[in-house]
Image (cartoon, helix red, strand yellow):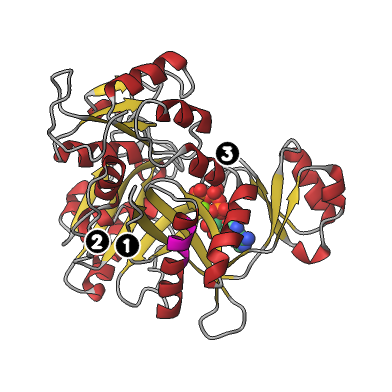
Amino acid sequence: MNALPIFPGTVSVSGQPATLGVMGGGQLGRMFVHAAQRLGYFTAVLDPDPQSPAGLVSQHHIQTGYDDVHGLAQLADVCAAITTEFENVPASALKTLAAHCPVAPGAGAVAIAQDRILEKSHFTASAGLAGVTCAPYAVIETPEQLQAVPADLLPGILKTARMGYDGKGQLRVRNAAELTAAWTDLKQVPCVLEKLLPLKAECSVIVARGWNGDIVSFPPQHNLHVDGILAVTEVFQGNMPQVHALRAQYATKLIATHIDYVGVLCVEFFVIDDGSEHGALVVNEMAPRPHNSGHYTLDACDVSQFDLQVHAMAGLPLPAPRQHSPAIMLNLLGDVWLDAQGRARTPDWQAVLALPGAHLHLYGKLEARPGRKMGHLTITGADVAGVKASARRAAQILGLPGFEGTS
Ligand code: ATP
Ligand code: MG
């Protein structure tokens, strides 16, 4: 087992710099790899896709399935520590790896994040201490539980307990008949039915927690979703009521600390309309990894969520991040590369890159498909008004639907 901290640039027995590994080769893995390499580490990515965004830029790319014993052995062999970039990595694989080197986050924490039923119990026990509750819900694993659903949970959203992301594995239901049909559509797998809440806003908080329990937080992100996928993140003073900002940060720290979490954790919240002036905060779900809503940290903070992922897993200090610029992040989905007839087109980068404070990040994906996350654009600037003006202009140029700014 490697001793922590694992310093960057340290030459290992193989004669190479210390290598940090990541399960999964998507865009989050790619940005992790960039952060690790900047510090002088080598990196290893495990992802079966030969064209995976992270695999393309990593020193090592192990192209096997996530539970392939040979692939995992190869990864463990080369790495001084290992993290993950997607929550549906088999928890058993993380457990196997943890016998060889530090793995952060651990299998236990990831298993909770993978299962909405476990996740909600965990939130009640942790965020509940900050007065933050989950949406009212019922667990549906049997026909008896389906029959027993209280009427006041309808209309609601039926969500599969496992494997959901970007709004997939979810069906909105208005009444008991629709609920029964929806559970059949979802193949009667274990689900939760959540009451459909009147959302005023959505936000998220990202924290990083170290092996020694140190924890630091980014400011709360104000998020706008379109069709169940994150479209816009706004982060600046006044992006949400102060009372929610502080409580959401506190609740996120409780959620992480309660399970002795190590690594970067993102927790999503709703602000619901309960008739009060600012509404009430409700905790939705957590991601055991950096998060799309934290991409702005690359350009608007002195340390990014990916830097802190590297620091946390390697046992390096966790400096409190400081945001040095207001920021708006616009997600760039595959639709931006397609015209109204579905034909391929090249977005007008010339015009986008001429905007003040525009930071374009493309993930190296070779095929644009509707809804596929291809990149993001972060706008920074000296003041909020200027950032909003640039973001609006970028949205117009790229034809991003429905963007008027969330606050
Ligand atoms: P992702 O992993 O991409 O964040 P997901 O597929 O895991 O998404 P959720 O975050 O649970 O799913 O839900 C997606 C979106 O659906 C939320 O961001 C919110 O806009 C809406 N939504 C989810 N649950 C509720 C609810 N109980 N009431 C009202 N809206 C909801
Ligand atoms: Mg979500």
- Estimate the spatial distance between the alpha carbons at disc 1 and disc 2, rounded to whole Å: 6 Å
The 10 Å Cα crowd at callout 3, few under 14, some 14 to 19, many 20 or more, is: some
Q: Please tell me which residue is depicted at 82% across the width and 42% down the height of the picture.
A: 142
Q: Under 8 Å from ligand 1: the CB of mark 2?
A: no
- In the rendered image, which quarter is residue 390 located in? bottom left
Cα separation between marks 1 and 3: 27 Å
Residue drawn at (39%, 31%), measured in percent from left and top?
A: 23
Measure the C-alpha gap from mark 3 to mark 2. 31 Å
Residue 228 visible at all? no
Residue identifier under label 2: 321
x and y percentages locating residue 399 in the rendered image? 36, 54
Residue flagged by tag 3: what amino acid is it? Met
Q: Which-is-in-front pick, marks 1 and 3?
A: 1
**Of 311 and 241, the residue lying toward us:** 311
- In the rendering, which numbered label is found on residue 68? none
Say if mark 1 contacts mark 2, CB within 8 Å. Answer: yes
| Residue at the (22%, 60%) spot, across then down | 300
- Residue for point 40% across, 63% down: 403
Label 1 or label 3, whichever comes before in sequence order: 3
Question: In the rendered structure, are the residues bearing label 3 and label 2 in contact, judged by CB atoms less than 8 Å apart?
Answer: no
Task: Kindly identify which residue carries mark 1.
Answer: 218
Please state the extent of the stretch shown in magenta in the rendering. 251-255
Count all numbered tags in the image, as a single digit.
Answer: 3
**As displayed, is residue 145 above or below residue 220?**
above
Callout in the foreground (3, 2) = 2
Q: What residue type is labelled 2?
A: Pro
- The answer to which of 294 and 139 lies nearer the viewer is 139
Q: Residue 163 carries which label?
A: 3
**Residue 199 x %, y %:** 57, 69
Name the image quarter holding the C terminus: bottom left
- Direction from residue 218 to residue 281 in the image, left or right: right
